Image (cartoon, rainbow, N blue to C red):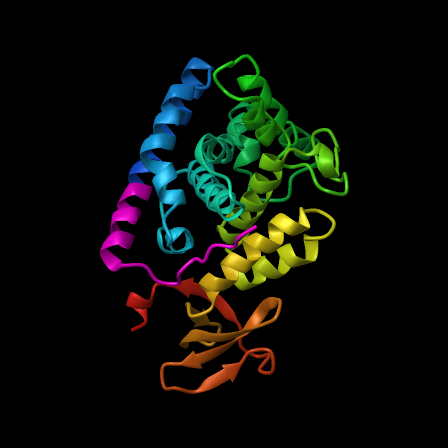
Amino acid sequence: MAISMVLPYANPSLLQKNFSRYKDTIDLVAMAFEKEKVFNEVPIVDYEELLGEYINLLAQAVDVVNILYNVRCHNEYTFKHSLNVAMLAGALGKWLGFKGHNLKDIILAGLLHDIGKVMIPQNILDKPGKLTDEEMTIIHTHPSHGYELLVDRFDTSEDVKLGILQHHEREDGSGYPCGVRGEKIHIYAKIVAIADMYDAMSTARVYRSTLSPFVVVEIMLEQMHEKLNAEICSIFIANIRRFLLGSFVLLSDGDRAQVVALNELIGSRPVVQLQNGKVIDLEKNRKIEAIAIFDKENIG
């Protein structure tokens, strides 16, 4: 499979245009979710309009990863997360060689992957502390709820439905809701699982702060051979690597720097160059770490 390249920086005017599309789409996703809460049915036509007019364009943008790291939105977490996963799943689908209606189905599965959470009590979704075993069991029902909401929708493919149902299944059978493993997990679900994990760990939540992309990728590497599909995950990480190399980072001591080198498996400790030209290997200097990525326009 050919691996596409994510450029670390896009044309500024194009980037700004995509930011605007992202914010507009967030609002449309929110309205679609609200319709579902009020009318107790999935407004599939609304989602397909989003797919055609906004999300497909965003998923094909070379700066898709930049969008996720530079746009901060105040909408409810599930809305933003659903859109981010749709874009990441679409980008990963492209890197895997999917096209046409198959690519659109992957993006739709990403957009709807958490749709079943509308059936989960809000106090559980918003709980700042650790969930009880009973609450966790309830959370684990959301993929099944999502599938059930769409099961009678004949205008939605079974591939999309399985992508939603199985996005928390894992290669070793440790996932939920059915505990299936390996080849029994639909490829769309494998794609959405990777996009979902990456965005969930990259986004701040009420119970923890955001993790840097270097740490997120390191965690995914650790899970790549047991929990996630190794081939798909390696292609995803290879493309993320192309974004991280050359990116600008905030260091834990307050300095800002550019990533100039990564070790073979990325790791959470790259080689960076400070604004004064000094080069620091964070693998050797363990007192400092890269804690966030920011747009190069904000280097000052």
Of residue 132 and residue 210, the one placed in the foreground of this image is 210
Regarding residue 109, the answer to whether it shows in the image is yes
Please tell me whether residue 3 belongs to the stretch shown in magenta. Answer: yes
Regarding residue 207, the answer to whether it shows in the image is no
The C terminus sits in image quarter: bottom left
What range of the chain is rendered magenta? 1-22
Q: Is residue 266 left or right of residue 35?
A: right
- What residue occupies the far front of the structure in this picture? 1
x, y percent for residue 182: 74, 39
Q: Is residue 9 left or right of residue 135?
A: left
The residue drawn where x is 62% and y is 28% is: 165
x, y percent for residue 282: 55, 78
x, y percent for residue 145: 59, 22
The residue drawn where x is 36% and y is 46% is: 73
Please tell me whether residue 133 belongs to the stretch shown in magenta. Answer: no
Q: Is residue 130 left or right of residue 273?
A: right
* Vertical side of 136 occupied by 286: above or below: below
The residue drawn where x is 57% and y is 82% is: 285
x, y percent for residue 158: 58, 22
* Vertical side of 261 occupied by 222: above or below: above
Of residue 270 and residue 207, the one placed in the foreground of this image is 270
For the image, the number of numbered tags is 0
Of residue 118 and residue 246, the one placed in the foreground of this image is 246
* Vertical side of 295 occupied by 51: above or below: above
